[in-house]
């Protein structure tokens, strides 16, 4: 017998007790999600619930139960949260938080990162046709809406930017795939990393970069 | 430059007025691509069907106008102007089969793509910002309950540890009889009992060695046990709040005195 | 209707519209109570809700709806709030378990109690040759491995210690009698092979250790 795994029937361990019924598990995730202002992962819920519980199933039950109610169970990336129904926002004027008024540059940069992620600073500049100030990136990072992604495997190994779960939470998105108009943009080829003519075949790296970008993007949006 | 003469003829009055308005507002542009997008919109056609040649002319006219009005344009606007002048000549001249590099049409197509992409990103940015937003349209829990972090220590021991411990004790000291063999052990409880009674008399600092039980001072084994027990008991008294301990320096005598508690 | 409620016909309020149905009012108080940073009075709720609403009735409906759920609608003075159900408080803790090796003093004390139960503290000290700290005993009691036995019918009536069912469970023993005796320990190589001098007079009876252990246990298992 190892130290970590007590034999079955050890009293000081939850395995002695039966896994709570699903209705009880639903109560548990309800309490956990309710108590937290931040989204909670399934893993975190399972860790806090008795052994053998299925937090994901319980959350799905809970989500169905709150359908049409004043508060809703929402998915934010791989996390879950309870949020008030958007149609009742007018009742909460007291709770409204003044969001920083974002500059046009910041809004566009954010949108480009969201739709093109993972995206390098050079690519953002190429799309906007103007250099991106450090302040804009810093602001978006500070707001918790973007973060660094993996480095691009091209010469210079530039850093990439991706949006965060906080971003998804703020804009009420389950995943980055739910971004408005994403499908249309993709079908119109407007999310392709199309190098300027005369650059694409200058070196092999340009090609690599494109391929890598696609890969990263698929990664991000498929999950 | 021959092109310049044709320029004015190729632009309508409306376009010129629009360009002038744009020049006055030059600070409002997010770079040359943004300016081009605005100029393109004056053509009032789908961005896919835009005349890049006309756009290049509009832009060059804009730059010219800015010069006339003595408006300083940032370097990247001038770089774009140079590039568009090059593109314009490429588009106007018949293709030279000897010439390396992309054709004027390729360059024009890419510029159209860039404009369409920028325009599309603007649209989705607006749609994104118009979504229901946390803290404005929907809200998180107002009174979150923090998750308390509890650290639990789990002690581990297995049967082997237990048996080895027992074997260790039983093989120690060559199995000397242990029962009734308390002669040389002075326990902390004994010391504590003794000191509890005595401490009431010690209002001033007293060396803890003076609390040693009689008959335990000489024999080294007994002395060691009694010293340890007395010291441990002294610590216990301090912990209980009945006494104070002090030591002036390392290895100096340890002194004890009763702690006066007004509320006790 | 309380003071906070605007009088009927006040401009810039919803009196033009019909009072929402009770189910809708319930959604509203649900969202308000959820998002509010502090408990809310009925008057405050009425002031936020469209004209003609009855927040108290809506809150009572909501309270009944959450009966037995993971969260509860509670009244705090003249204010209302939603709280997690008290029986789920343990979910609000994140436990980090740290495994530590039991100290030598503790394992030895435990071994003596297991082999000699019921045994007094003085006897444990005799066997170990050093005093037993209160902390060691307390720790073993807290772990649920030892408990107090009957008092010894000797002067001072000292308490005795015995091992518990939890102890037997943890160490995979049916009874404390299953603990191997000294002879078996030696055969298992856990003791020196050297026959210890004076082996015969291990205890006052001159019996060997094995027997002694049995004897102690017999005492314990008489009941």
Image (cartoon, coloured by chain):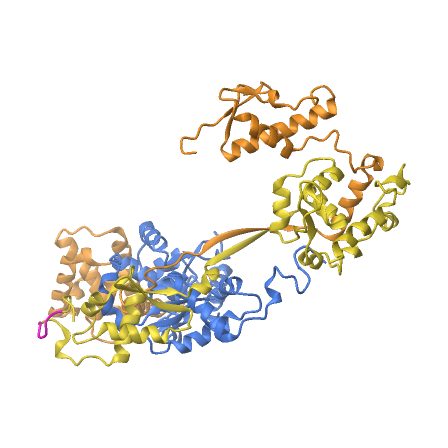
Chain colours: A blue, B orange, C yellow
Q: Position of residue A223 (x, y in %)?
A: 48, 69
In this rendering, does residue A110 appear at all? yes
Residue B86 is at least partly visible in this image: no
Percent coordinates x, y for residue B43 in the rendering: 20, 72
Residue C103 is inside the magenta segment: no
Tell me which segment is drawn in magenta: C6-10
Among the 4 quarters of the image, the one containing residue B178: top right
Question: In the rendered view, would you say A143 is above or below C28?
Answer: above
Give the residue displayed 24% in from the left and 81% down from the top: C21
The answer to whether residue A195 is left or right of residue C30 is: right
Say how many tags the image has: 0
Q: Along the line of sight, which residue is nearer the eye, C104 or A163?
A: C104
In this view, B87 is above or below C24: above
- Front residue (pair B204, B102): B204
Tell which of A137 and C132 is nearer to you: C132
Q: Residue at x 49, y 71 (%)?
A: A25
Residue B194, above or below B149: above
Residue B6 located left or right of residue A85: left
Q: Where, by quadrant of the figure, is residue C6 drawn?
A: bottom left
x and y percentages locating residue B160 in the rendered image: 76, 51
**Does residue B136 appear to the left or right of A15 in the view shown?**
left
| Side (left or right) of A88 relative to C115 | left
**In which quadrant of the rendered view does residue C128 lie?**
top right
User: What secondary structure prevails in the magenta region?
Assistant: loop
Percent of width and height locating residue A153: 51, 57
Quadrant where the N terminus of chain A lies? bottom right
Viewer-closest of B183 and C87: B183
């Amino acid at each position: 017998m190892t130290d970590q795994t007590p034999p079955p029937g050890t009293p000081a361990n939850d395995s002695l007790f039966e896994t709570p019924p699903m209705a009880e598990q639903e109560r548990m995730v309800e309490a956990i999600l309710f108590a937290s202002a931040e989204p909670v992962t399934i893993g975190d819920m399972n860790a806090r619930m008795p052994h053998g519980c299925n937090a994901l199933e319980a959350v799905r039950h809970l989500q169905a139960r709150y359908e049409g109610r004043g508060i809703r169970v929402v998915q934010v990336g791989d996390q879950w949260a309870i949020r008030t129904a958007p149609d009742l926002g007018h009742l909460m004027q007291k709770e409204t938080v003044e969001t920083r008024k974002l500059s046009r540059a910041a809004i566009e940069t954010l949108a480009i990162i969201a739709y093109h992620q993972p995206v390098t600073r050079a690519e953002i500049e190429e799309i906007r046709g103007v250099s991106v100030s450090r302040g804009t990136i810093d602001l978006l990072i500070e707001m918790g809406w973007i973060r660094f992604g993996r480095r691009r495997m091209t010469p210079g190994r530039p850093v990439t930017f991706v949006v965060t779960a906080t971003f998804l939470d703020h804009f009420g998105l389950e995943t980055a795939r739910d971004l408005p108009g994403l499908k249309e943009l993709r079908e119109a080829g407007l999310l392709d990393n199309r190098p300027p003519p005369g650059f694409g075949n200058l070196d092999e790296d340009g090609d690599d970069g494109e391929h890598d970008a696609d890969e990263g993007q698929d990664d991000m949006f498929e999950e | 430059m021959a092109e310049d003469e044709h320029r004015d003829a190729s632009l309508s009055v409306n376009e010129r007025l629009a360009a002038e308005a744009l020049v006055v507002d030059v600070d409002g542009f997010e770079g040359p691509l943004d300016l081009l997008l605005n100029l393109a919109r004056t053509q009032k056609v789908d961005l896919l069907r835009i005349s890049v040649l006309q756009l290049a002319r509009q832009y060059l006219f804009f730059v010219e106008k800015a010069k006339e009005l003595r408006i300083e344009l940032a370097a990247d606007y001038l770089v774009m102007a140079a590039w568009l002048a090059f593109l314009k000549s490429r588009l106007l001249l018949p293709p030279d089969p000897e010439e390396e590099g992309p054709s004027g049409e390729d360059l024009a197509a890419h510029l159209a793509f860039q404009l369409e992409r920028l325009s599309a990103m603007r649209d989705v940015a607006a749609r994104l910002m118009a979504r229901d937003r946390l803290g404005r349209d929907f809200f998180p829990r107002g009174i979150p309950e923090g998750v308390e972090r509890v650290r639990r220590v789990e002690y581990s021991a297995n049967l082997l540890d237990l048996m080895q411990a027992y074997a260790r004790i039983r093989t120690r000291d060559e199995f000397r009889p242990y029962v009734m063999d308390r002669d040389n052990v002075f326990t902390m409880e004994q010391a504590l009992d003794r000191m509890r009674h005595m401490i009431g008399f010690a209002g001033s600092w007293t060396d803890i060695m003076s609390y040693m039980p009689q008959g335990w001072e000489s024999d080294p084994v007994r002395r060691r046990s009694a010293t340890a027990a007395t010291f441990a008991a002294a610590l216990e008294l301090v912990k209980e709040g009945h006494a104070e301990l002090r030591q002036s320096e390392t290895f100096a005598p340890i002194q004890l005195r009763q702690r006066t508690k007004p509320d006790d």
